[in-house]
Image: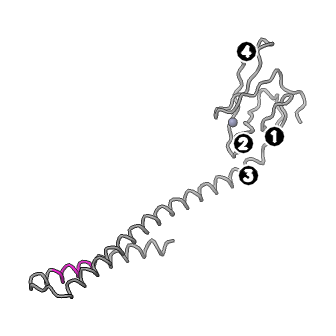
Amino acid sequence: MKDIAEFLPQALSSLNSVLSIFKTIGTVFNQSGDTTNTQESLVEATNVLLEAKSKIISAQEEHSFLSSEIDKLKQECMRLKDWKAESKRYARKQIAPGVFAYIENDFVEHLQDTHKYCCNCFDKTVKSTLQQKTKPIAGYKRVKALVCPNGCPDLELLNYSENIK
Ligand SMILES: [Zn+2]
């Protein structure tokens, strides 16, 4: 990739030099009143060079785009490596009957007091801390709801499990 990054501007510079020489030759022919086939050939050659110049400029743009895509992929690769190490510290646990969240492996506190991550987001390599709130629900006065800031469905529970699995 680096070779191309150096080659393309050099090729473009060479083409511009040749085009400049052709322009000078064309001016000389015009001044001398020459209307022979040589001048037509010169115009044809100039058009070919202009087309080559256009292709080099397109290749430069493509190279620039691909370079930025590679940089993005490298960053994503680094993030995923970090994520892999970080995610080993957590496990999916049933925190209430039928309610799951990711919590730290060495969790020792009360479930309500420890930070919990949303399973949907965690499985997409995103750490999203669930926030507890209470909300009214039919049949009960209020239930606890764990809310994901990324808009995942609320996790509703009456009470946390005593023994998590
Ligand atoms: Zn979520």
Type of residue at label 2? Phe
Q: Nearer the viewer, residue 82 or 36?
A: 36
Q: Which residues are magenta?
A: 18-26
Q: Earlier in the sequence, mark 3 or mark 2?
A: 3
- Residue 25 falls within the magenta-colored stretch: yes
- Contact between marks 2 and 4 (CB within 8 A): the answer is no
Percent across and percent down for residue 97 are 86, 28
Quarter holding the C terminus is top right
- The reply to whether the residue tagged 1 has its Cβ within 8 angstroms of ligand 1 is no
| Other residues around mark 1 within 10 Å, as few (<14) / some (14–19) / many (≥20) | some
Q: What secondary structure is found at the residue carrying circle 4?
A: strand
Type of residue at label 1? Arg
Q: Work out whether 162 lies above or below 46.
A: above
- Is label 2 or label 4 in front? 4
Q: Earlier in the sequence, mark 4 or mark 3?
A: 3
Q: Main secondary structure of the magenta part?
A: helix
Q: Earlier in the sequence, mark 2 or mark 4?
A: 2
- Is label 4 or label 1 in front? 4
Residue on which disc 4 sits: 136
| Other residues around mark 3 within 10 Å, as few (<14) / some (14–19) / many (≥20) | few
Q: What secondary structure is found at the residue carrying circle 1?
A: strand
Type of residue at label 3? Ala
Residue on which disc 3 sits: 85
C-alpha separation, residue under disc 4 versus residue under disc 1? 27 Å
